[in-house]
Amino acid sequence: MVVVTGGAGFIGSVLVWKLNREGEDKILIVDSFKNSGSQSKWKNLIGLKFYDLIDKEDVFQYLRSAKGVEVIFHFGAKTSTTEKDFGLVLKENYEFSKKLFELAFSKKIMFVYASSAATYGSGENGFDDDEQNLEKLKPLNPYAMSKHLFDLWLKKNGFLKYALGLKFFNVFGPNEYHKGDMRSFAVKAYEQIIKYGKVRLFKSYIPEIPDGEQKRDFIYVLDAVDITLFLYKKSQTGIFNVGTGKAHSFNELVKFSFKTLGKEIKIEYFDMPEEIKDQYQYFTEAKVQKLIKAGYDIKKTQNLQEKISDYINRFLKKGFKSIGEVEN
């Protein structure tokens, strides 16, 4: 049996879909269904095949007696990068993860978990997934710090050789619709174009970086889960970046969206809110040499225009339907 925490969430539900496509349906989906942010998560389950569904509060009792569990994909987390309650994200993302890993370790279950590119902070120490650099990283918000602390805990205790940690960069694609303000800019840009005929982007406050030329490593969720399963099947352990290795500007992403929709490009630039200026990343780009060395063909992830077009034409134009609705 395969366990997917966050299995009704964004990346988790697409991972379940991908597993289904590969013939796996003995899947236990674990998620949190008792908060306001989960009210529309159920839609991500449409068209998916799975063995059972439980709330995260019941996962430890369930797994202690479960037999035949081969792997836990731990993708459930408090993911808001603007959450200021450090105690909350510490409990959800650090303490819960430690407890789940210890249970998996005691039962010799493979443990694959979502870390985050947010752990790299402003990027002053680069975006290299070499575990020897972990202590140098300086996260910029409570969410990133909670993820960073779990990476460090695994390393400090010698557990990284028993786990696969995935530092996801800027993931976009179907099944993110429930995430509110934490949705990708790809879907927000589409909504603005359809509603207003234009897109608004933050101004830059670094003189050498023009407005809208802030860059991110945008990766399509279908590629993110493809990398996840590739590494798992290769029995890789340690920490890997899950990105394309090729940064694109917000201007580029927006222009690709306008082009896909056949509309005139209209971009406005506005002041960045004061509360995020000190936390804002102007550039992210995954170092993917370790992924390439493992045998993954990174080039198939790098055509952002193709990925944006696929997202818009295959999903967004069809009314924000989940991947299970569209593909099954």
Image: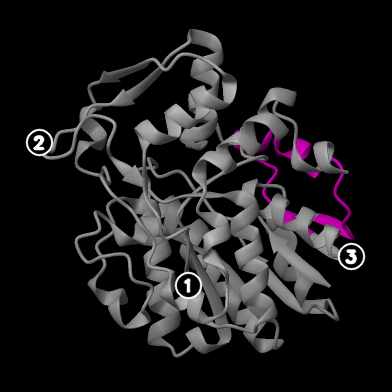
- Residue 319 visible to the viewer: no
In the image, 123: left or right of 265? left
Image height of 268 relative to 26, above or below: above
Q: Quadrant of residue 102?
A: bottom right
Tell me, yes or no, whether the highlighted magenta stretch contains residue 91: no
Measure the C-alpha gap from mark 3 to mark 1: 26 Å
- Quadrant for the C terminus, please: top right
Pointer 3 residue: 23
Pointer 1 residue: 240
Q: Quadrant of residue 280?
A: top left
What percent of the width, then of the height, locates residue 73?
A: 66, 67
Residue contact at pointers 1 and 2, CB within 8 angstroms: no
User: Of the residues tagged 1 and 2, which is closer to the observer?
Assistant: 2
Q: What residue sits 84% from the left and 64% below the top?
A: 22
Tell which circle, 1 or 2, labels the residue nearer the N-terminal end: 2
The residue closer to the viewer here, 1 or 48, is 48
Look at the numbered disc 3 and give the secondary structure of its residue. loop
